[in-house]
Amino acid sequence: MNPLIEKNSSPFQTPYFSQIKNEHYQPAIVALINQAKLEIDAINNLSEAPSFKNTIEALEFSGKQLDRTTSIFFNLNSAETSDEMQAIARDISPLLTEFSNDILLNETLFKKVKSVYDAADRSKLTPEQITLLDKTYKGFVRNGALLNDEQKQKLRNIDVELSKLSLQFGEHVLAETNKYALVIENEADLKGLPDYAIEQAAQDAIDKGHEGKWVITLDYPSYIPFMTYAANRALRKKLSIDFSSKAFKGDELDNQETVKEIVKLRNDRAKLLGYKTHADFVLEERMAESPKKVLDFLDEIQKHGIDAAKNDVKEVEEFAKKLDGIDKLERWDFGYYSEKLKMEKYSIDDEMLKPYFKLENVVDGVFQTAQKLFGLTFKKNDEIEVYHPDVTAYEVKNEKGEHMAVFYADFFPRPGKRAGAWMTLFAGQYKDEKGDHRPLISNVCNFTKPGKSKPSLLTFDEVTTLFHEFGHALHGILSNVQYESLSGPSVYWDFVELPSQILENWCYEKECLDLFAKHYETGETIPESLVEKIKESANFLEGYQTLRQLGLGKLDMAWHGQDNSNITSVSDFERSVLKNTEVLSPIEGTNMSCSFSHIFQGGYSAGYYSYKWAEVLDADAFEYFKENGIFNKEVANKFKDNILSKGGSEHPMTLYKRFRGQEPDVKALLRRAGLLN
C-alpha cells in the first residue's frame, strides 16, 4: 500500500505524514505521472471540437494527485530533508521536468489549445477564464510549442540540466551550513552575547559533539546574535568571512561553475524562445514588464538612498572610533556597532524588546490580527497529522464558522531544514463539481527554540518575519477562485510580496501590539514609550539597508539581463556590479552569488527587485489603512475582496487599482523610509 496513491479519507484531505516512507515517493510519482499522461491522452483523443471546457479546463484539472504528491515531497525536502530524500529529489526532478515538457511540447495538445485561444468569444468568458486561457496558451509558447523538433529537444535538455544544477546549488549551500561549527573553548570569547545565545551555543555544541564547549553555526538564529553582540572582533571577522564564503572555497561544495552554467543555460533557453535575455523572458509576465523598467526603478530609489547610506556608514564608523578607537569600520563591525549606536540613540535593543515577544503570544497576536481584519479564527487541531513534533496544525474558519483552510506552523531550526522563512502550500484552493476545495497552507521559520530557563523569545525582526510569512498564508487561506493555478499566491512574482509585506506594518502600531506584546514574566503590556522607540528606530540605517537590497537586485539583473557566456571569474563579475551600491569595503575571499539561493535555487531569478517593488505597493496600500484606521473593516474587506481572495485571476494592476483607486505611488515608500529630501 502506498499512502501517496491510496484514497485519502483524512479530515480536510490532509496528508498522512506518519504513513509516508521515503520508498513511497518515487513509485508514487512514476505511477501518477502515468495517470496524468492518460488524462492528457483523453484530451488529445477527443473527437469533438476543442472548447474552453474540454481543453483548457480539462488541462487545468489534470494531474491533481501528482501535484499534491510532489508538493508533499518538495515541501518536506525543504523542511525535513535527509541524504536519502536529496538523492530521491535528484532522481525525480528530471522525471517531472520531462513530464512537464511532454505536455508543453505536445503538438496535438498545443493545436487544440491554440484553436481555442484563436477562436474564443471572450465576451462569453469570465475575467478568470480569460486569464486561464491566456496563461495556458502563453505557457505552451514560453515553453517551446512554436519551436521545431530539434529546438524542442534542445529545450528539453536545457530544462533537465537546469533542474539538476538548481538542486545541486541548494545542496552545496545546505551542506556547507550544516557541516560548519565555530567551536569556542574560552568563555571570555562569549562576552557581549545575551544569555539565550550562550544557551543556544551550548546546546549546539552538544548537538555537534563538542559537549562542555560552545558552538556558533551559520544558521541565522546562531549567526546573527554573534555578529550583533559578540565583543571579540577577531571571531566576528572569522565568522563573517566563513558565512560570506559559503560554496566559494574551490572544493567539492563550490558553486562557481554551477552559477556560470545556470546563467548560461538560462540565457540559451531565453534565446531559443526568441527573447534577448533570461530577464526579458521572465519580465514578460511581471508588473515591471522589462529589464529597463526594473533598472530605472532601482536607479530612482538609489538616487534617493545613496547619500543616506553613506551617512549611515559614516555615523556608525564615527561611533565605533569614539567607542573603541576603530580606525576603519569593516563589514564584521557593522552589525555590532550599529546595534550599540541604536541603543545609544533610541535606548532600545533586541534584548529589551524580546521579553514582550514570547513566540506563543506573537502567534496568538497574528491570529487576532487576522480575526479583526478578515474575521478568521485559528483553532489547534491535534487530529491533523504533522510531519515533525515541532509542527502545529490549526483549522481555520471564517466568521460564519465555515472551514477555510488547514494551517501548519513550523517554527524551529533543525538539521534537515533549510535556513530562512517561507510560506508554502501542500494543496491550493480550487472549485469543481464537488465543491470548493480548501487549501493546506504552511509557514516555515527558524526561530530560537525555548531553552531550559526561557521560552522562545523573538527579536523584533523575527516578529516582522512571522507577520510577513503569515501575510503570504492569508493570501492562500482567503483564496476564492475557480482554478488552482490562479489561486492564492499564484500571481505575478512582483505582486506576490504585497500581502506579506503589508502585514509587517501592523507590528509598528500600538493598537496591534497591545493584542500580544506582553512581558512573558509579568504580563505587562508593552509600554507606549517602547513602541515610540520602535517607530523612531524603524528607519535607523534605512539608507544602508536600501542600498544593500538594491545591490542584490542589480546583481540579479546583471546575471540575467545580458549575455554572460564570456565570464571567467564569478568574483570579478560580482565585484564590478556591486561596486556602485557598496558603502563598506568588500571582504577578500567572499562572494554573494555562490550562496544567493533566492536566484539560483528559488524562483527569484530576474525577480529579486520585486522585494523593493512590493515595498512600494505595501507602503502605498498601508497609507490607505492608516487614513481610515488600521483595523477598518471597509478597507480590510476591499483588500480581501480585491487582492487576497482574487489570487492571479486578473492582472495585478487591475486588482490593485480596484482596491486602492489609483496606481501605486513610489513616493509612499520614500516617505515611509525617510528618504525624501
Image (tube, rainbow, N blue to C red):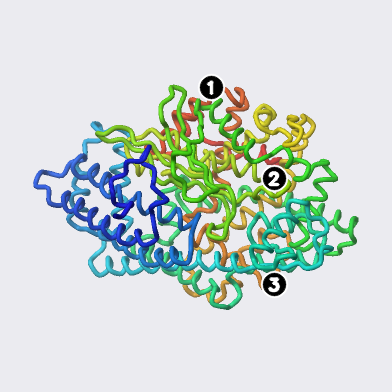
Q: Is residue 133 left or right of residue 358?
A: left
Indicate the position of residue 657 as horizontal and vertical percent values.
47, 32
Toward which corner of the image does residue 573 lie, by quadrant? bottom right
Disc 2 versus disc 3: distance between alpha carbons? 31 Å
Please state which amino acid type lies under the numbered disc 1: Lys
Tell me residue 626's x, y (percent): 62, 27
Q: Position of residue 608 (x, y in %)?
A: 53, 53
Q: Which residue is mark 2?
A: 459
Asked whether, in this view, residue 350 is left or right of residue 294, the answer is: right
- Image coordinates for residue 231, horizontal then vertical, percent: 82, 60
> Counting residues from the N terminus, which is met first, the one under dot 1 or under dot 2?
2
Disc number placed over residue 633 in the picture, else none:
1
Tell me if residue 163 can be seen: no
Nearer to us in this view, 485 or 379: 379
Q: Nearer the viewer, mark 1 or mark 2?
A: 2
Tag 2, which secondary structure?
Answer: loop
State the residue at coordinates (35%, 63%): 92
Q: Are marks 3 and 1 in contact (CB under 8 Å)?
A: no
Q: Alpha carbon of mark 3 to alpha carbon of mark 1: how far?
A: 53 Å
Locate residue 430: give its quadrant.
top left
What's the residue type where badge 3 is placed?
Answer: Glu
Crowd tier of the residue under label 3, counting other residues whose Cα lies within 10 Å: few below 14, some 14–19, many 20 or above: few
Per the image, label 1 sits on a secondary structure element best described as: helix
> Which residue was labeled with disc 3?
588
